[in-house]
Amino acid sequence: MDAYERNQAALFERLLKPHMVRLYRFAYRLTGSQPHAEDLYQDVLTKVFDRLDDLAAIEDPGPWLRRVLYNQFIDKQRQYARRRLVDVAEGDLPEQSVQALAGHSDTAAEAENLGDIAALEAALERLSDEHRIVLLLHDVEGYKLEEIQELIDVPIGTVKSRLHRARDRLRGFLQESGTFSRAPAC
Amino acid sequence: MNSDEPNKRPDDYLDEAALKRHLKAYGARPVPGGSDEFFERSMRQAVLGGARRARRRVWLRGFGTAIAASLALFAVTLMLMKDPQTSIPSVTMELAEPQTVNLVFASATVLRDATLTVTLPEGVDLAGFEGEREVTWMTSLQPGKNVLPLSLVASSAQGGEVLATLVHEDDDRTFRLRVTVI
């Protein structure tokens, strides 16, 4: 690379680095698959590098990057089609996954049952894309309603109703599977 | 507590608050992939690929496409006059002063995946590609006029002919632009 290209590369890395992890997590949530998430992420990086001037002009690139990724996912949905979940025995999981569920905090303790995790993922898979994406962004990844509205370009009322509906449906799927039961009346 | 379900925790009922807690806990788990090695590799790939694409694209602002078998016209902007002796379009440039020459290609149809190669004489460079005598890229053509701006810089007083060769399927056309440096 010549000097100009090296400068461009350094600028790109500086602008992108603070957002890489969150952007990849977003790619994973959309695709549900590591290979597809990596493909989607790589495609977006390639696209963003070609628009380095735009990236450099933005004060907070995070929302812009996620928007580019979301649009890429929508445009190429067939290419990044979600995989079907498969059941994995606890013994087959990487050790770090098991340890992460060892109850280090109250929330981790609640989710320590690996069977519950698999059932949750299976239930999420049954949601439609529009419900699943809103639910994952808000309740799993912690995005604010306004951030989601800007990202997927729908009115905030629509975001709220999709979120409410997604939770209802997810709850129903989980209760069907018996993973989390309603407390019986005493 | 219902004795038929001894394994269920007393508070393990799925109200909205509990669901949100489960989802938040799910979100706290690491996702597969996203290693440091992956991030470095993907950055590298984007940059190296981008450098290659930029070389093909540096003059393409405003240029939508390329050329077709039906191309019949090769014209230049108003600032250039045809050489009366040879009828080859010509441009006069000052040494070391960048000058944009707009090549206008007309096409009757949409043509995809055409190849455009610009060949430069010694002493005349494309801005950003100094020292490269031949630059090639893939593009496509829209019906009507398609403008290719070439940012030229003369590094010597030699001048010469710039060639633009367009290839689409089995057809190719070469167009000449005479460059005089003062």
Image (spheres, grey):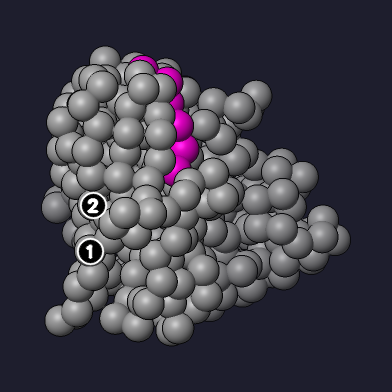
Q: Amino acid at mark 1?
A: Thr
Question: Is any atom of residue B141 visible in this view?
Answer: no
| Disc on res. B74 | none
- Residue identified by numbered label 2: B163
Q: Position of residue B141 (x, y in %)?
A: 41, 71
Q: Are marks 1 and 2 on the same chain?
A: yes
Label 1 close to label 2 by CB (< 8 Å)? yes
* Element type at mark 2: strand
Q: Residue at 34% of width from left, 70% of height from top?
A: B67
> With respect to residue A101, does B140 lie above or below?
below
- The reply, left or right, for residue A184 in relation to residue A81 is right
Q: Estimate how packed mark 2 is, as few (under 14), some (14 to 19) or many (20 or more) residues with alpha carbons within 10 Å.
A: some
In three-dimensional space, the C-alpha distance between marks 1 and 2, rounded to whole angstroms, equals: 7 Å
Q: Amino acid at mark 2?
A: Leu
State which quarter of the image contains the N terminus of chain B. Answer: bottom right
Q: Residue at 39% of width from left, 65% of height from top?
A: B74
Question: Is any atom of residue B79 visible in this view?
Answer: yes
> With respect to residue B105, does A6 lie above or below?
above
- Residue identified by numbered label 1: B174
Classify residue A2 by image quadrant: top left
* Element type at mark 1: strand
Q: Position of residue A112 (x, y in %)?
A: 40, 43
Nearest the viewer among B75 and A138 is: B75
Q: How many marks?
A: 2
Numbered range of the magenta stretch: B96-101
State which quarter of the image contains the C terminus of chain B. Answer: top left
Nearest the viewer among B98 and B28 is: B98
Residue A1 magenta-highlighted: no
Badge 1 or badge 2: first in the primary sequence = 2
Q: Estimate how packed mark 1 is, as few (under 14), some (14 to 19) or many (20 or more) residues with alpha carbons within 10 Å.
A: few
Nearest the viewer among B83 and A180 is: B83
- The reply, left or right, for residue A13 in relation to residue A61 is left
